[in-house]
Image (cartoon, rainbow, N blue to C red):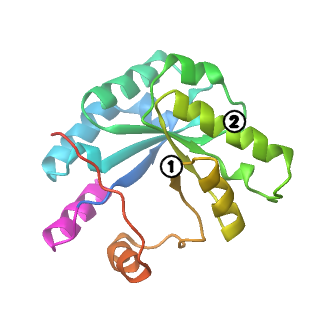
Amino acid sequence: ECVCRQMRALHDSGAPWINVSVNLSRLDFSALDIPRLVREVTDRYRVPRRALNIEVTESAFTDAEQRLYASVASLRSMGYSVWMDDFGSGYSSLGNLKEHKFDLIKIDMGFLRDFDPGARSNEVLASVIDMIKRMGTGSLIEGVETQEQLDFVSAVGCEFIQGYLFGKPMPGKLVSRFCREQGIATVTSRWRN
């Protein structure tokens, strides 16, 4: 609710809608009716559904209950963007990608840890990004901290890039100004409500 309240306040102050991501855990999906709750909150604050990204860590899908998968499908059918977070951080299951549709796959920063231009992990990362693109799903890599890493992930076709190279976490009210001052393009989506 806090995120939607802040998004509404920013928009009311003249800022454009900027996509914001919210991380939810397997416990959140087990304990709450997440699709209903998210819909009620976005409707209450009149936040466009495509402006709110719902992130679920890949590990949440390990031995997940059917309710989680049904909730993801429900959120997507209502117009929310659902992202799989931390892909490749643990026990990756390509079965999750085969059986369930996500709008974006966030690739874990571990692929860029101790980055070496000739490392075998770069071939794996390039293949993962290619696979994601072939599935028609968006790709984002976490943990980009150097120009060399940025050049590599850009060259292999990663669509979105996140990391300290661009900025560190900050309060929501500072994001718009920071992006303007740094000349960083923000992502906005076409959405339906």
Left or right: 96 as drawn, with respect to 21: right
The main secondary structure of the magenta stretch is: helix
Q: Is residue 149 shown above or below 64? A: below
The kind of residue on which mark 1 rests is Glu
Left or right: 44 as drawn, with respect to 30: left
Q: Which mark is residue 97?
A: none
Confirm whether residue 146 shows in the render.
no
Q: Residue at the front extreme?
A: 155
Mark 1 vs mark 2, CA separation in Å: 14 Å
Q: Which mark is residue 159?
A: 1
Q: Position of residue 40 (x, y in %)?
A: 19, 40
* Nearer the observer, 109 or 184: 184
Left or right: 150 as drawn, with respect to 118: left
At horizontal 73% and vertical 55% (from top left) the residue drawn is 112
Q: Position of residue 80 (x, y in %)?
A: 30, 38
At horizontal 28% and vertical 26% (from top left) the residue drawn is 77
Q: Sequence-wise, which precedes: disc 1 or disc 2?
A: 2
Q: Position of residue 186 (x, y in %)?
A: 36, 63
* Nearer the observer, 32 or 158: 158
Q: Which mark is residue 127?
A: 2
Disc 2: CA contacts within 10 A as few (<14), some (14-19) or many (>=20): few
Q: Image quadrant of residue 49?
A: top left
> Secondary structure beneath disc 1?
loop
Q: Which of the image's four quarters has the C terminus?
A: top left
Q: Is residue 110 shown above or below 18? A: above
Residue 146 part of the magenta-drawn span: no
**Which stretch appears magenta?**
1-16
Disc 1: CA contacts within 10 A as few (<14), some (14-19) or many (>=20): some
Q: Is residue 12 shown above or below 105? A: below
All told, the count of numbered labels is: 2
Q: Position of residue 104 (x, y in %)?
A: 47, 39
